[in-house]
Amino acid sequence: MTTHLIKLCVGAEKVEDLIEWQEARHGKDVATHVTRMWPKREDEILDGGSLYWVFKGLVLARQKVVSLSEVIGADGIRRCAIGLDRAVIRTEAMPRRAFQGWRYLDPKDAPADLPQDRPREEPLPRELMAALTEMGLR
């Protein structure tokens, strides 16, 4: 059974910012995101799970999780390095409130990928998205 992770993409305004940051930091290597908490549902994440990125209140992209590995910080604390496929897959815009750390995301609640011939989706105005969400239509 697969499960996903969802995380705020802090410091990034748009998907291109994430892509540029990962290219500058990791080159062509596997991108990693280090987090303090180790997922207890590791097997489910590694069974085809992705990390969904939230940009300014909207899920707009995901990356397939390829590994989870232990790293020890300079402070001696054990952390989890989430290895990510370099392909950043854009998704339909889905509103998501701010939260700390990461959360599990059930596959049935994950936004759909955008078709490959449509590389981006312009999100609706925030007020309209909030109204649609409140009505249960988005």
Image (cartoon, rainbow, N blue to C red):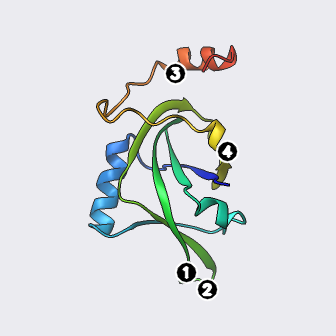
Disc 1 and disc 4: Cα gap in Å? 30 Å
Question: Do residues under tags 3 and 2 come within 8 Å of each other at their CB atoms?
Answer: no
Name the residue that disc number 4 marks. 106
Element assignment for label 1: loop
Residue 100 shows in this picture? no
Residue at 67 percent across and 44 percent down: it is: 106
Observer-nearest of 92 and 132: 92
Disc 3 and disc 4: Cα gap in Å? 24 Å
Q: Amino acid at mark 3?
A: Arg
Q: Amino acid at mark 1?
A: Gly
Name the residue that disc number 1 marks. 73
Observer-nearest of 105 and 97: 105
- Nearer the observer, disc 2 or disc 4? 4
Say few, some or many: other residues with alpha carbon within 10 Å of mark 1 (under 14 / 14 to 19 / 20 or more). few
Element assignment for label 3: helix
Disc 1 and disc 2: Cα gap in Å? 5 Å
Question: In which quadrant will I find the C terminus?
Answer: top right
Residue 76 is tagged as: 2
Name the residue that disc number 3 marks. 126
Q: Quadrant of residue 113?
A: top left
Q: Mark 3 or mark 4: which comes first in sequence?
A: 4
Q: Tell me if residue 26 comes above or below residue 61 in the rendering.
A: below
Disc 3 and disc 2: Cα gap in Å? 42 Å
Q: Tell me if residue 3 comes above or below residue 69 in the rendering.
A: above
Q: Mark 1 or mark 4: which comes first in sequence?
A: 1
Q: Mark 2 or mark 4: which comes first in sequence?
A: 2
Question: Do residues under tags 1 and 3 come within 8 Å of each other at their CB atoms?
Answer: no
Q: Tell me if residue 101 comes above or below residue 98 in the rendering.
A: below
Question: Do residues under tags 1 and 2 come within 8 Å of each other at their CB atoms?
Answer: yes
